[in-house]
Image: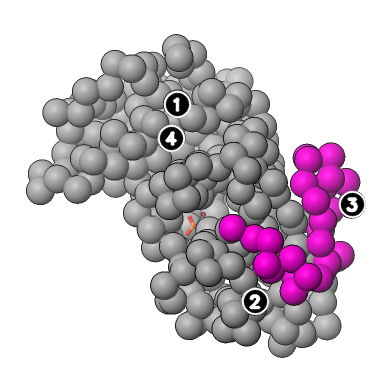
Amino acid sequence: MRWIRKHLLGLEELSAEEITAILDTADAFSEVSRRPRKKVPTLQGKVVVNLFFEPSTRTRTSFGLAARRMSADVIDITRAMSSIQKGETLIDTARNIEAMGIDIVVIRHSAPGAPHLLAKVMDASIVNAGDGCHEHPTQALLDIYTIRQKKGRVEGLTVAIVGDIGHSRAARSTIWGLKKLGARVIVVGPSTLIPKHITRMGVEVCYHFDDILHELDVINLLRVQRERLESSPFPSTREYARLFGMNTARMAKSKDDVMIMAPGPINRGVEITPDVADGKHSVILEQVTNGLAVRMAVLYLVSGKQPDKLKVR
Ligand code: CP
């Protein structure tokens, strides 16, 4: 296929063919990460700005490393280091950065739509690294890449996304992506954390985790995003862990080859017990490894290069 998108703003607008093209491109970059010399000249001469206005460990490091491995020049800007602290607007910040001659902006922001705003006012390519509760497309792509790598397919699998669906941008993007590639998706959690109209996205809803464990090929466990909550959506953390946490007893009721995922960061003892997080069914750290290849693929494609022209020397 011919790649025509300048930006990656979300998975809602991507076709199954486009998602597959990103995953296939990531396969080629995954091979680069296994070499003794991990650097390729693919983005030589390009400037990538990482604009992170919310905390991040995985996404910020991964985009930074991905761009450097492709020989781009990389600038890291955080809220604490920027003139936003002095009252500058996001648009003014963006225009000033652009005046220095940049090619790609990777942005994380608490406001849904912030990347879309930048895409309207900047000439650079914009990559959404998480906008409020809206979308986190590269997290979804690395989740789906990991499922495809481990299970050999996405179509026909039954995937549960468990926990704070309402506040999870990763869940929204993952639902869009999985549904487009033909998976069955069930969202699980307390009714207070599941949006009322979520079935419009083509998912099923379940409030009793134990009832469906035997059906699941993949279980994706979300963190409860307390920083986005005004009041507690359940009586206690212990109660949440009892009803929705993944633990040894629930593993025993699950399929022998069930795959345990989490976008991270994880809260051990809440949505997942340490033995499950570190157990043989967990792919949580493999997701992080795959995130690098997926983000290399995204930077490659939004920079105007074609999937079928990829030669990583
Ligand atoms: N999964 C994820 O987005 O992690 P960070 O917040 O650490 O980037």
Q: Is 276 a magenta residue?
A: no
Mark 2 and mark 1 lie on one chain; the one further toward the N terminus is 1
Place of residue 125 in the rendered image (x, y in percent of width and height, measured from the top left)? 46, 24
Distance from disc 2 to disc 1, alpha carbons, whole Å, reads: 36 Å
Other-residue count near label 2 (Cα within 10 Å), few / some / many at <14 / 14–19 / ≥20: some
SS of the residue at dot 1? Answer: helix
Residue 231 falls left or right of residue 112: right
Mark 3 and mark 4 lie on one chain; the one further toward the N terminus is 4
Q: Residue at x 58, y 58 (%)?
A: 218
Q: Is 213 a magenta residue?
A: yes
Foreground label between 4 and 2: 2
As drawn, 18 above or below 56: above
Q: Amino acid at mark 3?
A: Lys
Mark 2 sits on what residue? 253
Residue, far bottom? 238
Q: Is mark 4 within 8 Å of ligand 1?
A: no
Foreground label between 3 and 1: 1
SS of the residue at dot 4? Answer: helix
Mark 3 sits on what residue? 196
Mark 3 and mark 1 lie on one chain; the one further toward the N terminus is 1
Foreground label between 2 and 1: 2
Mark 4 sits on what residue? 23
Mark 1 sits on what residue? 21
Q: How many marks?
A: 4
Of residues 293 and 144, the one nearer the viewer is: 144
Boundaries of the magenta span = 190-217
Residue 249 falls left or right of residue 60: right
